[in-house]
Image: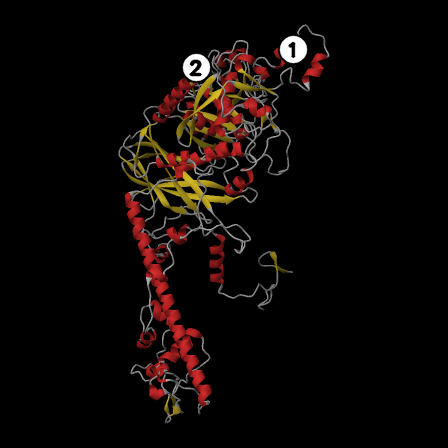
Amino acid sequence: MEFDDEMGYAVAGPGSSRSNSRPPNRARNQPPQEAVKQFWEQFNTKHPGKVYTVLPDNPYARTRAKRVPNGPIHGHEAAKSYEQARRECMKSVDRIVKECERVNQKYTDPHFDIELDLKSGRRHYLDGLDKPNSEMRPRGVKRVTEIFEKPQFFVNGPTASDVRQGYDGDCWLMAALCTMGNKIGLIEKICVSRYEEIGIYGFVFHRDGEWQQCIVDDKLYLRAADYDESVDERPLWDDINRTDTEEEYRRVWQTGSRALYFAQCVDDNETWLPLLEKAFAKAHGDYSAIEGGFVGEALEDLTGGVTSEVLSSNILNKDRFWTEELMKVNKEFLFGCGTGLFSNWLDPQYRGPPRDRKGISEQHSYSIMEAREEDGHRLLRLRNPWGRKEWHGAWGDGSKEWTPEWMERLGHKFGNDGFFWINYKDLLRKYQHFDRTRLFGPEWSIAQQWTTLNVPWSADYHSTKFMMDVTTSGPVVIVLSQLDARYFKGLAGEYSFVLKFRLQKEGEEDYLVRSHSSHFMGRSVNAEINLEPGHYHVLMKITAFRHEDVQSTEEIVRQVASTRREKLVQVGLSYDLAHAKGQVGETDQEKRESEILKRAERKKLRDETKKSMQKEWIRRQKLSARQERRAACRQNGPPRGPSSGSFDHDSTRGGVPGQIIAEKPVQDSPVDEGSVSSDNSDRRMPNTPSSVPTIQFNNGGGLHARHASHGWRRGAESPRPSLDARLSTDVLDPSDMELLEGFEFDSDVDMPPEVSDIQIQPPGDHEEELSVDPWNAVCVVGLRVYSKDPSLSLQVVRPVLDESQEAALDRDDPAASATAHQRDSYSWKDSWSSQLPF
């Protein structure tokens, strides 16, 4: 290795110029560009699409798909969907109550009977579809009236101090409920109907842009088994003499909130939290499905709000963030926070408990309860949903900052109850991630539309877009979302998607705003902006990632259909109903454009097929003529002279022997010239005339002889175009037209069948399987627009036949300069001349 004194670093010697200086690749049988093109053709599937229905012939999904609107969608009140779901839920609960009263039975949920499921060993409501959850081990199930001595749904209303997380990893849900407990009326809106005596409760949750009901019974999981069924606890309990062993066992192990396995209220007789958690688990399929998440996602599911992700390192003006956002907590916004998102990146194999940052647990969700500015101190009150373990720094319990005056002013009491205060500076330093959820009042309206996109491997702005018609000036919140895969875990497939979008006004190339980056919450992205009346386009960029360790939807269905039928039916129905949103019918205009495109493609295919058949016909005619010439040559002997002439044979004359005629200069034969260019014949024509004998058969009556004697000739200085070139330009010379005598083309016979006529056959053993599954990423996306313009309309715009202009790259894309269509008006000479002295 040499050292370059001038550059200051070691450089290697010059690379070898020999073609074999590196290990040879496999032999090339095509140009490199064609090889790359062929690779991508094989890389992408030839049958793109998505599984829309898992269950066979699902009538519910068909009905739902028929109700999916197409064309322009106008806004409606944001509360309309909630009111409709609330009324439906109350109506359903009332019907079930009447049925229970008629048969004198308490309500047992046939779709989520946790007692039968647990004791039969099926565990459909604890485990996910794809894998069991061995960490969830409840020991018993009882009704609310059997667990609580004086059960009450609310005790002094739902508050943050009620919440205590259980053995499920749903701290994100618990933190969201703590946050909502600070704003009166939010939690009460979730449970819309209940009959505690009968044991039935009706809840509503926000899913994929609309509110949906969920009804459950009052059975809850317990930490300990019944006395008569106990295996571990009873032997130890019976060793001690007691007055009433069984009753004391029940009071200690199976009475009050502490007896519950999952979430529990702090009050021993309050029941709203475990029942709400159960309904949330049922809505998602099982308790495993609600493990792990972000506070903002739960706040969206429980309030219908829109969550934006804020990283503390990205905040530009921390004073503005304090005054314009944090100080509006519990008013316009709700906030959650977390830390330690990348805490294990240097030790990916770490599986221990969450690490601690002065009492703050990593990878755990917290609620921001209150923001106060007192005497120049910016302070925030937070809560840990565990109900214990608090911040140990400044303003933590017992710290030197606390005085009796401050205790009274902030209304704080020391105690390991999960509540603690922290100053703004420490908040930004210790917490990396904030979930800010905007709430919408009755003055807001909403319009939404869904569609399905084929996502290419190379991410780019999609040709399908949303068009928005704004009629009134005002604030607009735009949300692009994908289906919430938490509702059908195990069937989501091997692809995950990252969403982005940008908004631009019709007729303008530059965009107005882009969606805020979402590093962790991939379910949706959003942007907020004030808009003037006009037409706007929302362009989407979807990036797909394929996870090789995850099985596809169709593979999971094959595996579990015979082993977990009931679980597949449960999760599959949720999958089918969700994906019905993506089956949007075509509008009348789209149908017309599609028909025009179909006819144009069919005509193009017809022309290509006809030209291919013409080429093959001419080739066969020429090969037949060549064989005739060679047969005649063998029969009459080789011709005199250094080169051969034009041979022909007329089959109508019975094969009369040819004769040698007088010598004369050889003329270029159009047929021979064409055969040299089109079929790589070894025959060559001299560039200059020479005196050679010519063999003539049947007095020149053969086809090739007629071509040779044709009046049209071409000199050496104007070579004849190849057959491919003549066919592609539709410029056929007279010799071609003669060769095409007898050629027939019938579209009904010679054209390949249309796609709709093809019967798709299952792959057989004779088909060669690809070594790697082809790329087939398909995403169902929806756009929601919140505004104060009730006349705002929204629709999906798919590409039309003559639409070929691509979307410009983002300003900060590294390739933006190379693809820009317009340049500044001044030239490079102008820019340089302006720097020159005069």
Q: Nearer the viewer, mark 2 or mark 1?
A: 2
Vertical order, 780 against 824 (above or below): above
Q: Position of residue 579 (x, y in %)?
A: 42, 37
Q: Earlier in the sequence, mark 2 or mark 1?
A: 2
Residue 262, by quadrant, is: top right
Q: Are marks 2 and 1 in contact (CB under 8 Å)?
A: no
Q: Residue at x 40, y 86 (%)?
A: 645
Q: Which residue is mark 1?
A: 246
Q: Amino acid at mark 1?
A: Glu
Asked if residue 715 can be seen in this view, the reply is: no
Vertical order, 690 against 25 (above or below): below
Residue 657, by quadrant, is: bottom left
Asked if residue 280 can be seen in this view, the reply is: yes
Q: Is residue 824 left or right of residue 564?
A: left
Q: Position of residue 644 (x, y in %)?
A: 43, 86
Near-viewer residue (120 or 225)? 120
Q: Position of residue 442 (x, y in %)?
A: 33, 23
Looking at this rendering, what residue extends furthest in the front direction?
654
Near-viewer residue (274 or 140)? 140
Which dot marks residue 206? Answer: none
Vertical order, 156 against 288 (above or below): above
Q: Which residue is mark 2?
A: 102
Q: Amino acid at mark 2?
A: Arg
Q: In what element is the residue under mark 2?
A: helix
Looking at this rendering, what residue extends furthest in the top direction?
243
Q: Is residue 483 left or right of residue 531?
A: right
Residue 533, by quadrant, is: top left
